[in-house]
Image (cartoon, rainbow, N blue to C red):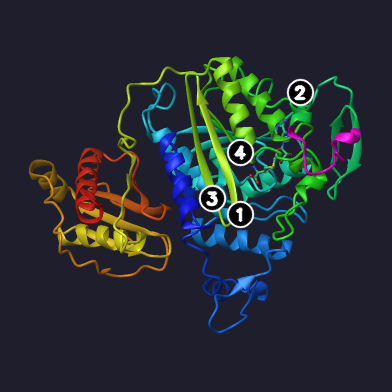
Amino acid sequence: MGGSKKRKRKRNEEQRGGTVYSERENPPDFALLASLYPEFHPFVQFLHSHSRPTIDWTDFNATRQLTRVLLHHRHALNWWIPDGNLCPTVPNRSNYIHWLQHLLSSDIIPNTISSDGKFRGFDIGTGASCIYPLLGASLHGWSFVGSDVTNVAIEWAERNVNSNPHISQLIEIRKVQDNASDPCVEVEESVNGDKIALCGSTDVEVAPLPLDLHACENRNYHGPPILVGVVRDDEKFDFCMCNPPFFESLEEAGLNPKTSCGGTSQEMVCPGGERAFITRIIEDSTQLKDQFRWFTSMVGKKSNLKYLTSKLWEVGVAVVKTTEFVQGRTCRWGLAWSFLTPLQKTPVSLPDKKNTSFMLEGLQRQYAAINVLEAVNSYFSSHGLSCTLNTSSFTVDVAAAKDDCDLILRNGLPIINKSIDCQPTREASSGSSLNLSSERLCFYISVFQQIPGTLLVKGSLQDRNSTLSGAFSMIFQKLEEALRDKFCTK
Ligand SMILES: C[S@@+](CC[C@H](N)C(=O)[O-])C[C@H]1O[C@@H](n2cnc3c(N)ncnc32)[C@H](O)[C@@H]1O
């Protein structure tokens, strides 16, 4: 993509208050992963000494192994899916989670549900991979209900949850009961034995391409329940999320020959496509407006984004937010809405005591995420706090004794020195190497690249019940000032 197109996209996003989420700047290190994971090694192609190793993106087994090793290496998650099921790409799914974290920690709307920062989400169509609950629980400690309609998805989602006992109590997998009396006809058997139910005439599946979007404009969703009938009357959630069946037909789903992410017909296809599916979520949201703070969905086509946004205003929502997810050459959009009356306009980042974040925008050209991470490390170590820089997870672990915290609370922390030496103190192989103790404040800072020139800096307390969280907020605010001062153009 040309530079002017990129700039135009960013400008458009900024105009409507969104952010472009992209992980394209941090590609996986295939050579490293091959050396760490012998099962992945056969899939890595070392073509030329001067080019990066790669994998065959059209080979389902290769993309599935890549997802497995990335989830293990970056997130310490055990994971697998059966042959032919939709294989999620980790950067794309992580982007949605980053965006949600951003929405939830902002105060665009009041926090009527989770007072303790432990957010609860509903993942519509969690799939065999159960990717969103696994990422949300491991990255942020969120709890989830993950729903799906197929037996294969339910069985494998449960397996994936149970393979990760450290977060399994945070995730409930819920089968959607399809009691609809719609005249659905079963027309096809998938590789896993689950049947696809297409409602009405089967010519939907063989619609000629390119797809005529107007043809499905009046087509309603006739499938199993999505939210109404699945969410219980006494349940409340901070958000729902959804990666919907995007396509109207299997032909349309199989259009990208450059990648192989698998996907059965049930996972990929819905009569009326994503437009019909998300329209149903919007209709359901009008009935469940008091049970969710945010309703969100991924959207695959920009034309649908416009259509759905106008639908939202029609049904009387109070807030709509959109964003763009960029991965390689693929663009997806995030759509969020709420019926809660927005609070007055406030800065994007607000500390919620346990987790807090800010966007570092307008980064000077010569600086990348690693420079910011190194500066975070130098900043804390130069003030006598114990820290560990971990470049594989892009985090800095920090620990401060109670006395240091008292001192910081009384006197504040000096602003970072402009000429600070950005050198890492030591490297840890993975995870935190610091001792947790009730007398110490332990937290970690992570840095995520959003787009070139924009980083998300996040601080998280290790001990969510720490009595020293006041010191944490103050230290984090000082860090924000210091990093802005050092890295951002005035
Ligand atoms: C595109 S896949 C997404 C899977 C996974 N969340 C991901 O991002 O890789 C869509 C999923 O929605 C499920 N699905 C379809 N209709 C549904 C419904 N009414 N309620 C819940 N899940 C549904 C499909 O079985 C499939 O697993």
Q: Tell me the crowding category of disc 2: few under 14, some 14 to 19, or many 20 or more residues within 10 angstroms, Cα based.
A: some
Q: CA distance from mark 1 to mark 3?
A: 12 Å
Q: Kindly identify which residue carries mark 1.
A: 89
Q: Nearer the viewer, mark 1 or mark 2?
A: 2
Question: Is 190 left, or right, of 362 in this rendering?
Answer: right
Q: Is residue 207 magenta?
A: yes
Location of residue 473 (image quadrant): top left
* Residue extending farthest front: 4
Residue 354 to residue 192: above or below: above
Give whichever of 375, 320 is nearer the camera: 320
Three-letter residue code for mark 1: Thr
Q: Kindly identify which residue carries mark 3.
A: 326
Magenta stretch secondary structure, dominant: loop
Question: Is 147 left, or right, of 27 in this rendering?
Answer: right
Q: Position of residue 92 (x, y in %)?
A: 56, 50
Q: Tell me the crowding category of disc 1: few under 14, some 14 to 19, or many 20 or more residues within 10 angstroms, Cα based.
A: some
Three-letter residue code for mark 2: Asn
Q: CA distance from mark 1 to mark 4?
A: 20 Å
**Residue at figure coordinates x 68%, y 24% from the top left:** 280
Secondary-structure class at tag 4: helix
In the rendered structure, which disc, 3 or 2, sits on the residue that comes first in sequence?
Answer: 2
Q: Quadrant of the N terminus?
A: bottom right
**Range of residues picked out in magenta:** 202-213
Mark carried by residue 220: 2
Three-letter residue code for mark 4: Lys
Q: CA distance from mark 3 to mark 2?
A: 29 Å
Three-letter residue code for mark 3: Val
Q: Nearer the viewer, mark 2 or mark 4?
A: 4
Q: Position of residue 487 (x, y in %)?
A: 25, 55
